[in-house]
Amino acid sequence: MSQLLPISALNEIHRDLSRMFDNHNGYPREPDAYETANWTPRVDIREDDMAFTVSADLPGVNPDEVKVTLHNGVLTIKGEKSSEKETEKAGYRRCERTHGSFFRQFTLPESTSEGSVKAKAVNGVLEICIPKAEKPKPLSITVAVE
């Protein structure tokens, strides 16, 4: 009979596979923050005619401790979710809620307007709105007659 892996081992395998397939399209990453990530918040990315909206589930995370940056077309979200460390002394019989640092990066298309990005946190969800840049309009050139 095969031995079952504990949940924490499965979570670690999932994180390792996610890191392996998330190469950030050749953009450099911050190895210290990424390697020490203990959990990965789930993220949805929506697109409409006007903007991209990134929604990240960050339950229990203080919005003041979340750092959102946009540099050279790469959106970075990182922070830390705190938890009690003394689980045995606090009377816990089971502890499944995740805690620790997190780090996510997304490469944005060139059609974004980096100067007017807005972020807000509501009920444990971080929402980042990245407007699209206006598409250049064709220039009409009058031909001079000589």
Image (cartoon, grey):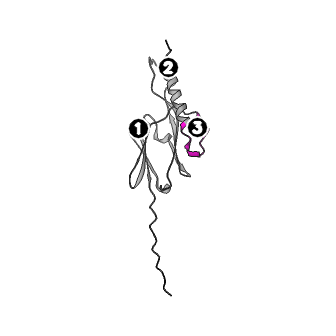
- The residue depicted at 44 percent of the width and 56 percent of the height is 132
| CB atoms of marks 3 and 2 within 8 Å | no
Q: Please, what is the three-letter code of the amino acid marked with disc 2?
A: Pro
Q: Please, what is the three-letter code of the amino acid marked with disc 3?
A: Ala
Residue where numbered disc 3 is placed:
33
* Alpha-carbon span between mark 3 and mark 1: 22 Å
N-term-proximal mark, 3 vs 1: 3
Residue 127 placement (x, y as % from top left): 42, 45
- The residue depicted at 61 percent of the width and 37 percent of the height is 32
Residue 6 placement (x, y as % from top left): 49, 19
- The residue depicted at 38 percent of the width and 39 percent of the height is 123
Q: Check disc 3 and report its element: helix, strand or loop.
A: helix
Q: Is 29 one of the magenta-colored residues?
A: yes
Residue 23 circle label: none
Front residue of 36 and 124: 36
Residue where numbered disc 1 is placed:
124
